[in-house]
Image (cartoon, rainbow, N blue to C red):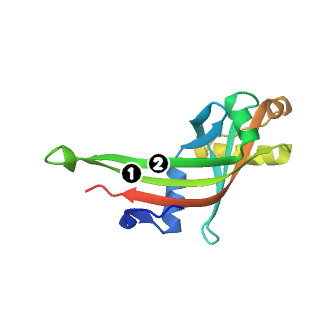
Amino acid sequence: MYPMRLHKREIHDMKEMQEILKECKVVRIGSCDGHGMFIVPMNFGYVFSKEERKLKLYVHSACEGRKAEAFKKNMQVAFEMDCTHALIQGDYTCSYSYAYRSIMGNGTIHKIEENKEKIYGLKLLMENLAPEAEIQFKEEMLQRVAVYRIDVTEFTGKKREPK
């Protein structure tokens, strides 16, 4: 990753990274196609290993459209998620700021074809969004949905603490 300018805001603690993953419900995925760059917000599930510092994100989508075509042609993506938002007030305009915690990174996106892994990814997504929900996956639904896994190659965390 490009070196962070404000080193004091970089998050190195993997436990805090896991807290951010739990709190965030939307990941913004950046991709590129023949029409240019674009960003799409998506709900996600994840697998995170603090010890190995490994992260995989699972997202779902329609099987066709700009996003599906872009992911097929260019598997390299960027992503960002943020949470813990709060205004930091000041005495004058330039002393105002914003508190947050975020994770940004890059990875390779793969369309999942096997139903077993599709169900696994969708269960992770539901655990992140609605852990109390009991969901059943019907065969016809699995055929209509595209599930993607992002194998994250690099990521970093950053925060601005409220005063």
Residue ID for mark 2? 82
Q: Quadrant of the C terminus?
A: bottom left
Q: Position of residue 91 (x, y in %)?
A: 13, 47
Q: Which residue is at the far left?
A: 91
Helix, strand or loop at label 2? It is: strand
Q: Say above or below: 124 vs 61.
A: below
* Residue located at (62% from left, 41% from top): 31
Residue drawn at (47%, 48%), measured in percent from left and top? 82
Amino acid type shown at disc 1 = Tyr
Q: Which mark is residue 71?
A: none
Classify mark 1: helix, strand or loop: strand
Question: With respect to residue 151, does 51 lie above or below?
Answer: below
- Judge by depth and name the residue closer to the eye, 60 or 120: 60
- Of residues 119 and 108, the one nearer the viewer is 108
Numbered disc total = 2
Crowd rating for badge 1 (residues with CA inside 10 Å; few <14, some 14–19, many 20+) = some
Q: CA distance from mark 1 to mark 2?
A: 7 Å
Residue found at x 59% / y 42% = 29
When asked about the image quadrant of residue 66, the answer is top right
Rendered-image quadrant of the N terminus: bottom right
Res 30 → quadrant: top right
Q: Bin the neighbour count of mark 2 within 10 Å (Cα to Cα): few under 14, some 14-19, many 20 and up.
A: many
Residue 41 in percent (x, y) is at 56, 37
> Which sits earlier in the primary sequence, circle 1 or circle 2?
2
Q: Are marks 1 and 2 in contact (CB under 8 Å)?
A: yes
| Residue matched to label 1 | 100
Residue 92 is situated, as x and y percent measured from the top left of the image, at 14, 45
Left or right: 152 in relation to 90: right
Residue shown at 58%/37% (left/top)? 37
Q: What type is the residue that disc 2 sits on?
A: Asp
- Residue 18: x %, y % from top left: 54, 60
Residues 65 and 17: in front is 65
